[in-house]
Amino acid sequence: MLDAVVVGAGPNGLTAAVELARRGFSVAVFEARDTVGGGARTEELTLPGFRHDPCSAAHPLGINSPAFRALPLERYGLEWLHPELPMAHPFIDGSAAVLSRSVAETAASFGPRDAGAYRRLVEPFLPKWDTLVSDFMSLPRTALPRDPVTLARFGLTGLPPSTWLTSRFRDERAKTLFAGLVGHVMAPLSGFATGAIGLVFALAAHARGWPVARGGSQSISDALAAYLKDLGGEIHTDYEVKRLDDLPPARAYVFDTSPTALAKIAGFGDYYANYRYGAGVFKVDYALDGPVPWTAKEARTAGTVQIGADSTEIGTALRAASRENRAPEKPFMITVQPSIVDPTRAPVGKQVFWAYGHVPSGWTGDLTDALERQLERFAPGFRDRVLARATAGPPELAARNANYVGGDIGTGAVSGLQILLRPKLSLSPYGTPHPAVFICSSATPPGPGVHGMSGHNAAKAVWRRLRQS
């Protein structure tokens, strides 16, 4: 009998398996698709030689993850590549605000009226960032906070809506960039704890940057899988699990799946009936005949580029997708251009480009034209660079990855109390009604992102049970 079986070979499932195998437990992973990866995959979606990331592409949470930093993933091929600028937010007039590794450079891009306010916002947390991120991403109750005072101060700053936090800024440049940071998790700007979301992304950039993985996000998953195999773990692909009886006998079962999928497989009925899924995304992967022709020079050297004319436009787009059940006319966009630091991703002289906008859950329309009209506002002539495109709306995303219910790449709405209390109101969010069954997906704290911390935290709950039995 195995000690643990993990269902789903995304970053969280693989991290949970690695953590258990490191502690001497026998582990096997079962994945429905023919390769490991989940939200961290790389595929030729457009033309031969163009390697795209179907989901996550830039990894501020990955390089800052306490779980990943504790593992020897570099020995297994993971290499972080840093663009000159982690992120840029261009404006219609050809200028841009930036999120740089340097707090001073970032503050200067906001203008003199907001530079001091931004420094006062982030500088108190940066010297204690490693402890803070470990405490923040281990909530709730998987470990006692190492610095409860700093964690409490962060909570007081970040728990109010982001609109409250950005009220300290006087000009639109800082407000717009920060609104875009919140938009990474598809949360309305006025929501609970959205200030914390924006602050985490900003601090992550200052601490270690927003890198891409050389060769694509698949490198993260492949490194985890290779390490797991060296630890004696097994990985079985092309193995769809429809019920618990499909799995071999084990002392514990760990699911890197959506809560509703777990409930169906394990027979939990309506246990997760109140769990909410959020807005979906419409994503386009581009093969380009050269770099994006950004008007703002800062955007040409940034790994990630946010697209939204101002904070009002961004807020309108987020509300349309998440609350008004309609596709925005001017979508807020997140784009990534890996080729500026990784020439292995495309043929010589060409580039891959990654972009998405928000749409209602389950939306079946085509947002391509609206996205490209937005891009043309900030990069005139963009369409002339397009060699090929691969589009994926909510139905296609959900078909590729069953965790993306309705196209929700966060595996659950990041809004209201569900930002912190997911998938249920519980001090043991990784447990389920069955004492031997656990959940470790992005539906559990600390939530979405390629960081492995949900798997890391769930593994703690699993090994406590295994040592007791």
Image: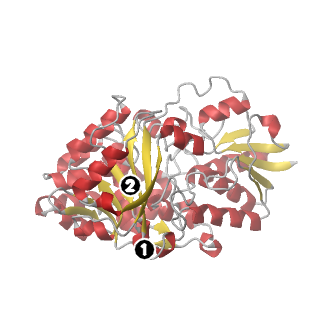
- Labelled disc at residue 200: 2
* Residue at figure coordinates x 37%, y 40% from the top left: 187
Q: Quadrant of residue 24?
A: bottom right
Q: CA distance from mark 1 to mark 2?
A: 24 Å
Q: Is residue 52 left or right of residue 252?
A: left
Q: Which residue corresponds to mark 1?
A: 341
Q: Residue furthest right?
A: 1
Binning the other alpha carbons within 10 Å of mark 2 as few (below 14), some (14 to 19) or many (20 upward) gives many
Three-letter code for the amino acid on which mark 2 is drawn? Val
Q: Is residue 213 left or right of residue 94?
A: right
Q: Quadrant of residue 415?
A: top left
Viewer can see residue 401? no
Q: Is residue 380 above or below residue 411?
A: below
Viewer can see residue 290? yes
* Residue at figure coordinates x 26%, y 57% from the top left: 121
Q: Is residue 262 above or below residue 400?
A: above
Secondary structure found at label 1: loop
Secondary structure found at label 2: helix
Three-letter code for the amino acid on which mark 1 is drawn? Val
Marks 1 and 2: which is nearer the front? 1
Q: Quadrant of residue 118?
A: bottom left
Measured as percent of width and height from the top left, residue 352 is found at: 44, 64
Image quarter hosting the C terminus: top right
Of the pair 445 and 188, the residue shown nearer to us: 188
Measured as percent of width and height from the top left, residue 60 is found at: 44, 61
* Residue at figure coordinates x 34%, y 63% from the top left: 385
Of the pair 370 and 88, the residue shown nearer to us: 370
Binning the other alpha carbons within 10 Å of mark 1 as few (below 14), some (14 to 19) or many (20 upward) gives some
- Labelled disc at residue 399: none
Of the pair 245 and 44, the residue shown nearer to us: 44
